[in-house]
Amino acid sequence: MFDCIIFDMDGTLVDSETLCNRAYLTLLPQLPLTEDEMVARFRGRRFSTILAELEQMIGAPLPEGFAERYRAEVKRLFYQSLAAFPGVHEALAQLDVPLCIASSGPQAKIRAALEITGLAPFFGGRIYSAYDIQSWKPDPDLFLHAAQAMGARPEASLVVEDSEVGVAAAQAAGMRCALHDPHGLHLPKVARFEHYQAFPGLVRQLAGAVTSS
């Protein structure tokens, strides 16, 4: 059995990637990418890295106060439209394992998303942000920090991710990883699931491998 399950948030538990990238396009309509292209390009990426790439794409510095305006627009879109992926609540209710969040987003964004989608009771205060330790995926530090805080062994921890950089971070931390993959990312040698109805069964399957190893 796993000591704990560590969930990424954006694109893993909640369907927020489209909303986050819609906010970029709302504020920078001159960007040359579609919403879907933005999601694919920036999934799992660090905010400061995305901002630097946006400046390259528009060929100019971002407007003053852009980061604050962006976060305000994301907050507005979250309260208007954010939802958990179908089946998440039912799947989490079946798990008899300590759960936590480890996200590249700031604490305020994580907590707002969990409250809006009704997922907060599953995690309590077990929320870990890259901003807390100033280390971002694909570095393994965030997942190692979360496991240590949970009193969990890395080799007996399961990470649930939706991005290539997140999977790389989990693997670098020596943890098993399950890829929530509704978009067909299909990373090699990574257990994957498209719908949360299949997730509890996948956890049992992966936990059996941990127990026997």
Image (cartoon, grey):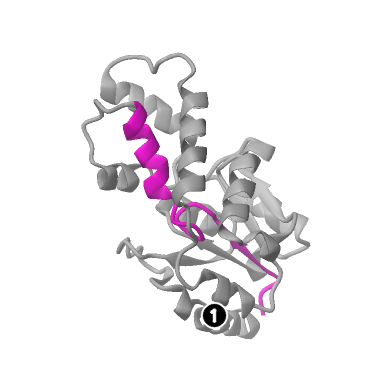
Q: Which quadrant would the N terminus be assigned to in this image?
A: bottom right
As drawn, 176 above or below 104: below
Residue 198 at what x, y percent from top left?
46, 80
As drawn, 83 above or below 206: above
Looking at the rendering, which quadrant does residue 120 occupy?
Answer: bottom right
Rendered residue at 51%/33% (across/down)? 71
Q: Which span is picked out in magenta?
A: 1-27
Residue 18 at what x, y percent from top left?
37, 48
In the rendered view, does 40 fall on the left or right side of 161? left
Rendered residue at 52%/39% (across/down)? 75
In the rendered view, does 192 fall on the left or right side of 170? left
Numbered-mark total: 1
Residue that extends furthest to the front in the rendered view of this protein? 80
Rendered residue at 55%/41% (across/down)? 136
Q: Residues within 10 Å of mark 1 (few under 14, many from 20)?
A: some
As drawn, 134 above or below 66: below
Q: Is residue 9 magenta?
A: yes
The type of residue carrying mark 1 is: Pro
Rendered residue at 40%/45% (across/down)? 19
Label 1 residue SS: helix
What residue sits right under mark 1 in the picture?
Answer: 200
Q: Is residue 149 magenta?
A: no
In the rendered view, does 118 fall on the left or right side of 23? right
Looking at the rendering, which quadrant does residue 22 occupy?
Answer: top left
